[in-house]
Amino acid sequence: MQPEFVLTALVVCVAPGIGVIYTLSSALSQGARAGVLAALGCAISTAVHLAAALAGLAAILHASAILFQAVKIAGAALLMFMAWSALRETGALQVRTQGPRSPASLIGQGIALNLLNPKLPLFFLAFLPQFIPADHPAPGAMMVELGLVFVALTFLVFTGYAFLAGALRARVVENETAMTWIRRAFAASFAGLGLRLALAER
């Protein structure tokens, strides 16, 4: 495995994005276990996007402006809903007045958030081939290998975020002022990501 690929993939995974924000919000609301489940959902959807890229669906998204726009708008709408839910103290950031969300709900929303990002399969098609030597005897197999490593790193990094947020949770959930600003910060993050996705070009 190329060290430069692992390092680059780690940088991509650590950078704040839809999956990181969702994992952090889930862990802060319900603890590290909820964050790990959220991270699992994000990793599953990353694997699905990898399969889509390898199957050529990314090329379809790139060629079809209508399909790309439809997926993009749906993803942006879901992120805006997450922002509204955070401000209303519901969903992932509800910490006191609502019972814990089920594992299926945490995983399912993580899958949905990332599946509705049409740029992920395009990212795989643009990112992975850069690390495959031109004379490699089996470029397809190596692309699968690199993609699976990326999926594994995604889960590990997001799990790290979950445990970090879970450890901090006990110190902030009883602080009403801190939780108010945290909810606002996550709402702004979801809204910003949704706006960026809505304005994204192919």
Image (cartoon, helix red, strand yellow):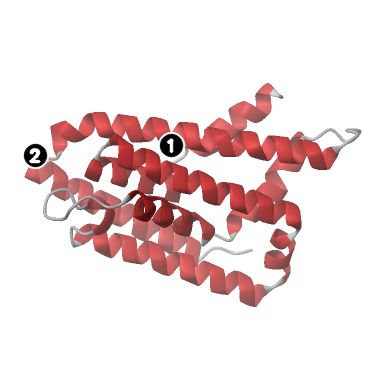
* Residue 22 picture location, percent across and down: 37, 49
For the residues labelled 1 and 2, the Cα–Cα distance comes to: 24 Å
Residue under label 1: 158
For disc 2, the marked residue is: 174
Label 2 packing within 10 angstroms: few (<14), some (14-19), many (20+)? few
Across and down, in percent, residue 115 comes to 53, 58
Q: Secondary structure at mark 2?
A: loop
Which residue is found at the position 55% from the left and 74% from the top? 70
Report the disc number at residue 8.
Answer: none
What amino acid type is highlighted by mark number 2? Answer: Glu
Quadrant in the picture for residue 172:
top left
Compared with residue 136, is residue 108 higher up or lower down, i.e. above or below?
Answer: below
Q: Tell me residue 108's x, y (percent).
A: 42, 56
Packing grade of label 1 (10 A; few <14, some 14-19, many >=20) is many
- Residue 151 lies in quadrant: top right
Position above or below: 79 against 32: below
Instruction: Please state if 72 lies on the left or on the right of 170 as rendered.
Output: right
Question: In the image, what residue type sits under mark 1?
Answer: Phe
Could you tell me which residue is drawn at 59 percent across and 64 percent down? 201
Q: Residue at x 81, y 42 (%)?
A: 140
Query: Where does the N terminus fall, quadrant-wise?
Result: top right
Q: Residue furthest bottom?
A: 66
The residue positioned 62% from the left and 28% from the top of the image is 6
Evaluate if marks 1 and 2 touch, with contact meaning CB atoms under 8 Å apart: no
Identify the mark nearer the N-term, 1 or 2: 1
Name the foreground residue: 22 vs 193: 22
